[in-house]
Amino acid sequence: MGSTNKHFVLMGDFNYRFLQWPPLLDDISIKSQAIDFCHCLEDNFLAQHVDFCTRNDAILDLVISDEPNLVSDMMDLGPLQGSDHNVLAYKLQVRTKQKLSTRRIFGYAKADIEAIKRELNAVD
């Protein structure tokens, strides 16, 4: 995604019961789908940023990005009211570039409407 100056961030409850991050892929408690998911992240050079439990004793909620330094200051704010998941807070490190546009804007409020009408009436 480098040359487009666009980035990718995906966050949510993935329901893979990781006990730690990075996971130990030879751990028999990790399902094959979760292992395939980890390989997919690696194959696509994606970074996962949550390294603490987000629900009871497992990491279910993940924040994935295409740059390892895009996400920082990951924090656990405790359980969400009415939910068994914890609230995550983090910062996204983004840079913006202001694009100046130059275009002509007409001041129609200053127009001489009567002169315009006379000109248009003079056209056959």
Image (cartoon, rainbow, N blue to C red):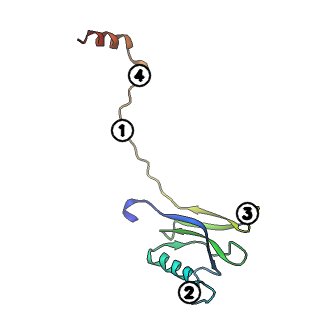
Which residue matches tag 3? Answer: 80
Q: CA distance from mark 1 to mark 3?
A: 47 Å
Which residue matches tag 4? Answer: 108
- Residue 12 locus on image (x, y percent): 60, 66
Q: Residue furthest right?
A: 82
Give the residue type at disc 1. Thr
- In front of the other: label 2 or label 1? 2
Residues tagged 2 and 1 counted as in contact (Cβ below 8 A):
no
Q: Secondary structure at mark 4?
A: helix
Give the residue type at disc 4. Tyr
Which residue matches tag 2? Answer: 25
Using the image as rendered, state which of residue 98 and residue 49 is in the foreground.
Answer: 49
User: Viewed as shown, does residue 88 lie left or right of 118?
Assistant: right
Q: CA distance from mark 1 to mark 4?
A: 18 Å
The label shown at residue 102 is 1
Q: Which comes sooner in the sequence, label 1 or label 3?
A: 3
Give the residue type at disc 2. Leu
